[in-house]
Amino acid sequence: MALDYEGAVKRLLTANNTVTAVTVVDGAGGVLFQTNNWDITSDIITILNSWRQQQPSIVVQGIKYSTLQCTQERLVATNIMGQGHIVCANFQDQHITIAYVTPDGGAGVAYMDVARANDSIIAGEAPAEAAIPPTAPVVPQAEVAPTYEQTYQQPTQTYETTVQPTTPVPSSSWATTSQDTDMKNLLWELDEFAKFVTRGEFGQFLQNILREGDQVKCWELLKVIRSMKSFMERNP
């Protein structure tokens, strides 16, 4: 029986409307099916190599996505500037589904739907109903970290990347001041933060967060980065 790649992808797009672009490839990176709203043919080999080598990030169409979960069967990555997520599911290297998830979509939930669709290709069946995230209060998008990450922690496996010891961030008074601090102290604290950045400690802190792959920490840091980016755009 011929494998129905297009049918599986269409059912996936219907089941989860935050999945908007999909490519199905074989284990060697050959394209088996691709939605017509993107073309990642030139990125596929790099994506697969980064995945198999458990690199800390992947690049798709020139956009960097930081790896959150990486196993032989699963890849979940997110863009820390809020440009969406990439989720991939692998069925025994026979066929691999690579999907783009919109920024307001839950990457962990989307992975479950992508994995079901990927498995349905070999089974010739429709994927089950879209995965339902764990019960949690409904909140506005991009305000509270998704709650599903505790369900989908990367399992311990022999090919798991060894996490290097992280360097704790030095405590600094610039993080503990009140709103009524006078101008002199404000300037001093800004100067302390500037030194913290130029010494490379802030960069090391970011690397530690990305290496840990803790989705809650990544989300909290992302909110700070977005706020800083917005401030910079308002004050060029």
Image (spheres, rainbow, N blue to C red):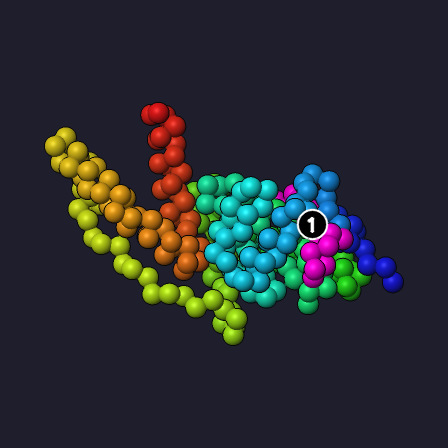
Question: As shown in the figure, which amino acid type bears the numbered disc 1?
Answer: Thr
The answer to whether residue 40 is visible is yes
**Residue 115 locus on image (x, y percent):** 65, 59
Residue 196 magenta-highlighted = no
Which quarter of the image is occupied by the N terminus?
bottom right
Residue at 21% over, 37% down: 190
**Residue 78 locus on image (x, y percent):** 51, 49
**Residue 196 locus on image (x, y percent):** 24, 45
Q: Indicate the secondary structure of the residue bearing disc 1.
A: strand
Residue 22 magenta-highlighted = yes
38 horizontally vs 101: left or right: right
Residue at 38% over, 48% down: 220
In-front residue for pair 78/207 = 207
11 w.r.t. 123: above or below: above
The answer to whether residue 104 is visible is no
Residue at 36% over, 56% down: 208
41 horizontally vs 74: left or right: right
> Which residue appears farthest toward the bottom when viewing the image?
158
Which quarter of the image is occupied by the C terminus?
top left
**Residue 136 locus on image (x, y percent):** 48, 53
In-front residue for pair 64/7 = 64
Count of numbered circles in the view:
1
Magenta stretch, residue numbers: 13-32
In-front residue for pair 170/123 = 170
Quadrant of the rendered structure where residue 30 is?
A: bottom right
Identify the residue under disc 1.
23
